[in-house]
Amino acid sequence: MLSTYFGDPEARTLAGWRARGGYEALEKALAMDPAEIQTLVKDSGLRGRGGAGFPTGIKWSFMKPDGKVHYLCCNADESEPGTFKDREIMRWTPHGLVEGVALGAHAIYAETAYIYIRGEFTEPIARVQAAVEEAYAAGILGANAMGTGRRLDVHVHRGAGAYICGEETALMNSLEGRRGNPRIKPPFPAVAGLFGKPTTINNVETLTTVPYIVKHGAAWYNAFGRADNPKSRGTKLFSVCGNIARPGNYEVELGFPFGEFLNELCGGALPGREIKAVIPGGSSVPILTREEANAAVMDYEGMVAAGTMLGSGGVIVFDDRQDMVKQIARLARFYAHESCAQCSQCREGTAWTTRILERIAAGDGHARDFDTLLSIGENMSGKTICVLSDSCATPVASGLKKFRHEFEAKLGPDRSRGVVPALPILGKTAAA
Amino acid sequence: MSDNTGPKMVTLTIEGRTAVVPEGTSIIEAAKTVGVLIPHYCYHPGLPVAGVCRMCLVDVEKFPKLAPACATTVMEGQVVHVHNEKARTARTGVLEFLLINHPLDCPVCDQAGECELQDYTFQEGRAESRYEEPKRFNPVEDFGGDVMYVPNRCILCTRCVRFMTEVADDPVLNVSERGDRAFIGKAPGHDLTNEWAGNVVDLCPVGALLSKDFLNKARAWELDRSASICTGCSQGCNITVETRDNTVVRLKPRSNDDVNLYFMCETGRLDYRWINRRDRLDQPQVRSPDGALRVMDWEVALDAAADALRGRRVHVLASPNASNEALFLAERVREASGGQGWYRVSYGHEAPLPGVPDLSLRAERAANGTGARLLGYHELTGAPTIGADDAVLIVDDTLEQHATDALLQALRAAAVLVHAGTTLPTAIADRVHVTLPLANHTEEEGTFTNLRGRVQRFLQSRTAPGLARPSWYVLADLTERLGLTASLAQPAQVFDALAAAHAPFAGLRHATLGLRGRLVANAAEFAEANAGATT
């Protein structure tokens, strides 16, 4: 579905996209009542593909025809380590995204939509910008969108390279020209979002999927997925990277067996190697061992059952050459670097975690560091404005649990730094 | 307070106590009403909520996660736990995080003793550190104005940033960098020279923003503090005068929602050295037959002053920084003899604080110009007309600022010159018949009337030099000798006599002024008359 035209340069142009059935869904949708589209998407079972998996139709249904100015934000700030699915959508099918954005804006009673694209995505930005310009020139967007008399404006905004700006409220702050700091919720974006107006934020993949649902119907989309799980329907893009034979983007039906995915579709481990660990949904989710990964099922519930999360669908594979301590330290360093510095726990905790891990990785750790790491993680989780702090603590905790032997193998001599021995009391011996 | 048209009230339980607060109140404010202080750093009632320090996390029953008390509004029937295991553990965690990169240099930090990081760590922080890594270091930075920034002590609560951005409307400060590399940055080419910038030092809960003026001057626990009113302008900001060994070392704003909220300006804050001046009059003196001023004891001097004034028309030249009480008693003398009452005042630039309605550094640079006007004094511009047989009673006009030759000539030409003040002006020193040493406003008790007609008390914070006495005391002794008032033994009695004698003050009683003041009867006129000038 989404990946059909990956690699097909003609699909990038308006003419090419139209020849492939593009903008038919938008035309159909503009003739529909927004509430009808909301119901349609609700019935399709589509859930947010950015990572949280919130049902898209329900999110849209928060937007009522209340006469207020509404905004749609398309989150194209794809920065989760290991995730590169949105990039491919924007590179190959930019019109698919523009169509989805225009359709989504109509569905939530908005006239204006913003596509917030990660600043480093130079090619995707150029592709999407070109598609938007083509769409304006063709009258698909603008004051009289597709001749319906409705106004639909789409603006492409280039981010400045902060991971946190992919968090929806930070994204809105960034769009407004403020520092990209997450906001306290409530108020939720549907009540007071961008410029204080009701706002919906959707991921690129989510919005690009919607035209297919409008075109083929909710039941058609709902038919994808494993039969025994009514909660995860449709298909999903997975980006696979790391120590694997065939890395790249794969679109599979939700409910696909993860073992088959890794070993058959992606070709398994590199020759002579063995897969050791897999992060299934972007760097923020708990790490799986090979055994756990092989038994997991690729949908929201399946991954939860395996003790992790589907997340953004960024699959990172580690083979037996990899030093897990080093890998986890690298992940923590990423979060420490990207913490927005608002919440005390995240600002200090991510950096502290990184320093401890890097010290252990350098062979200067002590067993008590494990307790400290877990305790810091506990103090960092569930207590901050956004989940960046939790995202740092999660892989550390799961890595420490599942690969503890690797951590233990790295421990160095106890230097007892920072621990001051009790001073002997005058007149008494310390031993007493 | 409560009436039927008021906001809807919400009842909730905080730490087992029942709080009834208006709808929309935050949990942190609701807790204050039942005597529970929820530890916090970034929250400040005078600033927009940030919710970033995560110190005020409380356990609300039926909430999945701990909730920030500053950013969570109360709901009917809510049950809030502040001191249970879950909330306390979270706070201990926050304190540990805040301290890992903190230099722990309390012994050399100005904030020690009034530091919220120190207080809460002492209350519920960990006794020992688990941090074994090197600490982050950033150099001290001069922020300009009176402010110095010590980034290593900063907990990034952003109170200063929010004050400058939202309240002072002068966004000079920002959070620069990310992660634990973050620090408070200053816009290039700008300094904290805003008239209200000094408030960031008060707002800073730790020792990160310090007053350069106060730097290393005193430890917080050595200071004595008393409630007072700023004499810098007619706004009448409520302040705390802080003294060390009888010397005023710092002025701090004292909150009053009706006047200055939590703030005071730099002009008021830094203008305190004159209070400590050493060239004060400290003994009563009377001119002897040989022409020299001789030290006398109080009774002799007061008799001499009364004798000199008796039977003459007495004009009064009073300072607009004199208390209502002193102005009232001097006015008795003037009024009984048919003389004039004058005051002289300096003017400066106005500097409103945009985020707070009706708060500004006012052009009239005196605390009690309104009181003087209400008590029948007129601003003196140019030279006064003084008859050849008239007496002049000078009440603490130092004649230091813009005293023209014409004014001095006129005063010198008066038949009798009685001076009551803190210093003896040299220009008239050879002409005064009696000089009576007065306490300044930090050395006595009294009231000022601000530009909105709010009568506010100030209390004594230090002792007066030598034999100097409170102005109300000296002038009451004089009016009693002249048969104009009964014996008045307390400043409260003087104020109540004032209220009985002057219509604008009718209905006010010293006992009910409190420390937030009361409005005079015709205060509405001031609000209207001045509304145009400030907007």
Image (spheres, coloured by chain):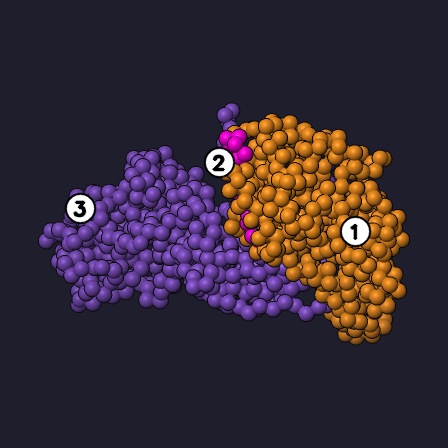
Chain colours: A orange, B purple
Do marks 1 and 3 share a chain? no
B305 over B1 or under it: above or below: below
Q: What is the number of the mark on residue A280?
A: 1
Residue at horizontal 58 percent and vertical 31 percent from the top: A30
Report how far apart the C-alphas of labels 1 and 2 lie in the structure. Answer: 43 Å
Report how far apart the C-alphas of labels 1 and 3 lie in the structure. Answer: 93 Å
- In this rendered view, identify the residue nearer to me: B226 or A404: A404
Within-10-Å neighbours for mark 2: few <14, some 14–19, many 20+:
some
In the image: residue B392, left or right of residue A11: left
The quarter holding residue B96 reads: bottom right
- Mark 2 and mark 3 residues within 8 Å of each other at the beta carbon: no
Q: What residue type is labelled 1?
A: Pro
- Magenta span covers which residues? A144-159
Asked whether residue B163 is in view, the answer is yes
Q: Residue furthest top?
A: B4
| Residue A402 within the segment the image draws in magenta | no
- In this rendered view, identify the residue nearer to me: B145 or A391: A391
In the image: residue B381, left or right of residue B468: left
The percent position of residue B104, horizontal first and vertical second, equals 63, 66
Identify the subunit bearing mark 3: B
The percent position of residue B365, horizontal first and vertical second, equals 31, 53
Do marks 1 and 2 share a chain? yes
